[in-house]
Amino acid sequence: QVQLVESGGGLVQAGGSLRLSCAASGRTFSNYAIMGWFRQAPGKDREFVAAINWAGTTYYADSVKGRFTISRDNAKNTAYLQMNSLDPEDTAVYYCAASLRISVSVISDEYDYWGQGTQVTVSS
């Protein structure tokens, strides 16, 4: 089993930045090929934000490309999501997820473990 705990959410003004962290425990973090971030806004479906594989290759949704950066530190069992130039449209609960699959997926059902989520609110 793997436990994922997100932190770093909060309230920020438009144009500001936040850094989310996802701490993993319960199993060797580096064994997981894919770490991902998803988000869910009120009344909307959960959507893919970004993912990173074991080699450090990154993948982004078009809506965040150029503004968000995903990274991981296997020594610290932690994944990160640096979010810059935040927009009110980025307001959502952000979830960290881990996938046992080899290839990156943007489909939430293909991730095996999830954190509890952290709220990000961007004011205009």
Image (cartoon, rainbow, N blue to C red):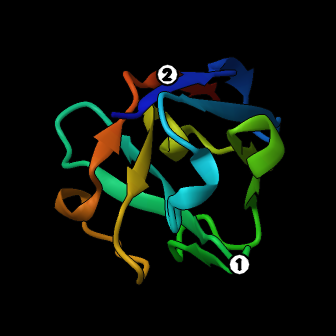
Q: Which residue is drawn at 32% across and 42% down?
A: 113
SS type, badge 2? strand
The percent position of residue 40, horizontal first and vertical second, equals: 32, 40
The percent position of residue 68, horizontal first and vertical second, equals: 72, 58
* Rendered position, 117 above or below 70: above
Q: Which of 23 and 7 is in front in this view?
A: 23
* Rendered position, 18 above or below 48: above
Which residue is denoted by mark 2 in the rendering? 118
What quarter of the picture does the C terminus occupy? top right
Task: Specify few, some or many for label 1: CA neighbours under 10 Å numbering under 14, 14-19, or 20 or more.
Answer: few
Q: Which residue is drawn at 75% across and 61% down?
A: 67
Q: Are discs 2 and 1 less than 8 Å apart at CB?
A: no
Give the residue type that dot 1 points to. Ala
- Left or right, residue 98 beside residue 30: left
- Left or right, residue 46 beside residue 55: left
Q: Nearer the viewer, residue 43 or 111?
A: 111
Give the residue type that dot 2 points to. Thr
Q: Which of 32 and 108 is in front in this view?
A: 32
Tag in front: 2 or 1: 1
- Left or right, residue 61 beside residue 101: right
Q: Quadrant location of residue 20?
A: top right
Which residue is denoted by mark 1 in the rendering? 55
SS type, badge 1? loop
Please, which residue is most extreme toward the top here? 10
Q: Which of marks 2 and 1 is nearer the N terminus?
A: 1
